[in-house]
């Protein structure tokens, strides 16, 4: 029983990461109707930035985090101008090609530049754990989880209580009407894509405290994040947070009860069940 | 107009066929013959993807699952039950077709990204199941012992493989052609262009999507059996990885999705390039080939959604070669 409880706690902590990645994905989908297939590659990229900040300048991952988020925001802003903006009005298979190609380019670029070696950072707090009632909680995972929740709250506040956030929400609801109200839709899109990638920056930097990085590290995370998005309803940010926790628990418990190899299968079965019984997601989604 | 254009097309096709049939007499080097076989195999697979992705507009990224299942069924039947891979190939195709209908059923209600998620998840699940399934050797993969015998679908020389896959490709393209001219094909295009409208016109969209899916999956399985007998080694990660699914899509989309010759053109351009990168730069610059492919995908997504055929058509229209025929093409657009 204690083991299952332990697995659940681990699942929730890992689920926070899934939430963070999925929130960015969901935000981009909700506002622009674009699935960013390169999202996993972006997580990988920000993990590498964090890694090199540590290995070259000895900057702690948690200190590098804001920097990584800003870098990712700028990258997202520029990508939106150069790549995504051109595909917004094309059929969705072109949009798929654009971001999928980006994923392939980034992954092979990472392989080319940094080889397929696994790299990890050994931070001083890497081995710290608490023991509460017989359940062990890793400090770095707890920090990452809290950061994920904090980011979700900040984003929620930003979207609901600032002018820019309201403009983003308006654009998500109706692009034409927003444009008629004097909102610069393209600018909003750039900000949104930048924000989505900034979230992957936060996720990457905090993952780096307890995880390792290699060129294909992002894809399993992204695949899980897509499932999380569908679970929570595409475009629903709060749904993505909850969905991340649910999938995190499901994966972790099933890895303990069945076998770690099957955690993707379990996520997929959940995904199928949601699509079958409630295709708009548990909390209602934004459809095309 | 169409009748006039017809003889030219026939001429091109006959010319192409003659070249393809005579190619092994010029390519004495087995390495180049291997590249030619790869080109034809991927053209065959891209063509199978095209039925669902190009004509029906359902961009599947899970076709590698059917590819792998075809390879596994023919191999298992051959090694464990002594059934010739020729028969195993047909069994595999039938099984893949049925599986496509079953797995396609829940996915029929999905659109756009949901459908893509579903197909990726499906293929990944099948891959993990095969990786952990001890009876089919799991993650060790299966080596097919070499016994030079046409009944076993194993040949010493590469030339028979070349002609087999060439004939498969011709049959596959003929199937695509006849589908595109038949009711299923017309309905598929209607579904691609506007599904709600197609439904409103009384087309049973679910039924025709499953038809397209089943035919496509069966062809995939045949390609998988061919791969198994050609390489004589199968492994879930080689066959069912997402990379493969992406290549199937890419070949059709790069050549020109929803066109008969698109996959062949796409395969003939991309596969030799990839092989070139792999053979010349593979050691020092691993990943450069994929980088290049990724760039092509991005360019297709942003600048040339109609693929190479679309670009060629644009050039033809601009310089109005055979102006009368092409002015019709331009108007249709």
Image (cartoon, rainbow, N blue to C red):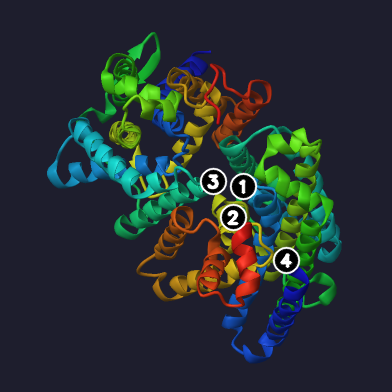
Residue nearest the viewer, comparing A155 with B25? A155
Q: Which residue appears at 74% of the width and 82% of the height?
A: B14
Q: Which residue is mark 2?
A: B249
Residue nearest the viewer, comparing B275 with A79? A79
Quick one: label 2 or label 4, which is nearer the N terminus?
Answer: 4
Does the residue at mark 3 contact the one at mark 2 (Cβ under 8 Å)? no
Tell me which corner region of the image, top left, top right, bottom left or bottom right, holds residue B173.
bottom right
Instruction: Bin the neighbour count of mark 1 within 10 Å (Cα to Cα): few under 14, some 14-19, many 20 and up.
Output: many
For marks 1 and 3, give the one nearer the viewer: 3
How far separated are the C-alphas under marks 1 and 4?
A: 24 Å
For mark 3, give the secondary structure: loop
How far separated are the C-alphas under marks 3 and 4?
A: 34 Å
How far separated are the C-alphas under marks 2 and 4?
A: 19 Å
Residue nearest the viewer, comparing A63 with A66? A66
For marks 1 and 4, give the one nearer the viewer: 1
| Residue B265 falls left or right of residue B225 | left
Instruction: Bin the neighbour count of mark 2 within 10 Å (Cα to Cα): few under 14, some 14-19, many 20 and up.
Output: many
For marks 3 and 2, give the one nearer the viewer: 3
| Residue A231 falls left or right of residue A104 | right
Q: Which residue is mark 1?
A: B59
A110 is higher (above) or lower (below) than B109: below
Q: Which mark is residue A91?
A: 3
| Residue B306 falls left or right of residue A176 | right
Does the residue at mark 1 contact the one at mark 2 (Cβ under 8 Å)? yes
For mark 4, give the secondary structure: helix
Q: Which mark is residue A30?
A: none
């Amino acid at each position: 029983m204690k083991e299952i409880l332990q697995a659940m706690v681990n699942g929730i902590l890992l689920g926070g990461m899934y939430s963070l990645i999925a929130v960015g994905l969901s935000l981009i989908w909700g506002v622009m109707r674009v699935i960013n297939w390169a999202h996993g590659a972006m997580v990988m990229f920000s993990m590498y930035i964090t890694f090199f900040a540590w290995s070259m300048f000895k900057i702690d991952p948690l200190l590098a985090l804001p920097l990584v988020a800003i870098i990712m925001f700028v990258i997202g802003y520029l990508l939106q101008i150069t790549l995504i903006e051109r595909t917004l009005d094309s059929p969705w298979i072109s949009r798929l090609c654009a971001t999928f190609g980006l994923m392939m380019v980034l992954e092979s670029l990472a392989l080319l530049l940094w080889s397929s070696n696994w790299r990890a950072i050994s931070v001083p707090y890497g081995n710290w754990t608490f023991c509460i009632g017989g359940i062990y909680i890793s400090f770095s995972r707890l920090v990452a989880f809290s950061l994920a929740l904090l980011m979700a709250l900040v984003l929620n506040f930003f979207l609901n209580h600032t002018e820019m956030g309201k403009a983003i929400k308006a654009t998500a609801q109706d692009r034409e009407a927003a444009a008629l109200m004097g909102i610069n839709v393209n600018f909003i899109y750039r900000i949104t894509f930048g924000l989505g990638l900034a979230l992957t920056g936060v996720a990457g930097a905090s993952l780096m405290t307890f995880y390792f990085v290699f060129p294909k590290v992002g894809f399993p995370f992204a695949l899980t994040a897509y499932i999380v998005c569908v679970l929570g309803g595409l475009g629903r940010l709060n749904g993505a947070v909850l969905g991340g926790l649910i999938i995190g628990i499901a994966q972790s418990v099933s890895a303990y009860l069945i076998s770690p190899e099957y955690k993707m299968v379990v996520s997929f079965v959940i995904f199928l069940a949601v699509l079958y019984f409630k295709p708009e997601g548990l909390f209602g989604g934004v459809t095309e | 107009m169409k009748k006039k254009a017809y003889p030219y097309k026939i001429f091109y096709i006959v010319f192409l066929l003659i070249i393809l049939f005579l190619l092994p007499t010029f390519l004495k080097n087995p390495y180049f013959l291997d590249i030619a076989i790869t080109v034809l195999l991927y053209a065959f697979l891209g063509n199978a993807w095209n039925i669902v992705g190009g004509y029906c507009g359902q961009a599947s990224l899970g076709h590698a699952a059917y590819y792998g299942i075809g390879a596994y069924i023919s191999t298992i039947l051959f090694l464990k039950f002594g059934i010739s891979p020729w028969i195993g190939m047909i069994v595999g195709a039938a099984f893949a077709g049925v599986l496509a209908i079953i797995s396609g059923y829940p996915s029929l209600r999905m659109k756009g990204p949901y459908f893509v998620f579903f197909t990726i998840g499906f293929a990944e699940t099948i891959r993990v199941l095969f990786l952990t399934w001890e009876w089919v050797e799991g993650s060790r993969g299966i080596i097919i012992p070499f016994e030079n015998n046409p009944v076993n679908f194993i040949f010493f020389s590469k030339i028979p493989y070349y002609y087999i896959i060439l004939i498969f490709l011709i049959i596959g393209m003929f199937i695509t052609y006849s589908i595109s001219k038949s009711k299923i094909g017309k309905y598929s295009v209607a579904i691609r262009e506007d599904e709600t409208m197609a439904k409103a016109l009384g087309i049973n969209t679910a039924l025709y999507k499953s038809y397209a899916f089943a035919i496509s999956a069966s062809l995939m399985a045949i390609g998988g059996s061919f791969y198994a007998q050609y390489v004589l080694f199968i492994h879930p990660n080689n066959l069912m990885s997402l990379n493969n699914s992406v290549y199937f899509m890419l070949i059709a989309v790069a050549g020109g999705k929803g066109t008969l010759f698109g996959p062949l053109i796409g395969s003939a351009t991309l596969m030799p390039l990839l092989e070139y990168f792999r053979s010349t730069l593979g050691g020092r610059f691993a990943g450069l080939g994929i980088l290049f492919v990724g760039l092509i995908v991005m360019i297709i997504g942003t600048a040339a959604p109609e693929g190479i055929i679309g670009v060629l058509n644009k050039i033809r229209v601009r310089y109005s070669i055979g102006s009368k025929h092409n002015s019709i093409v331009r108007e249709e657009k």
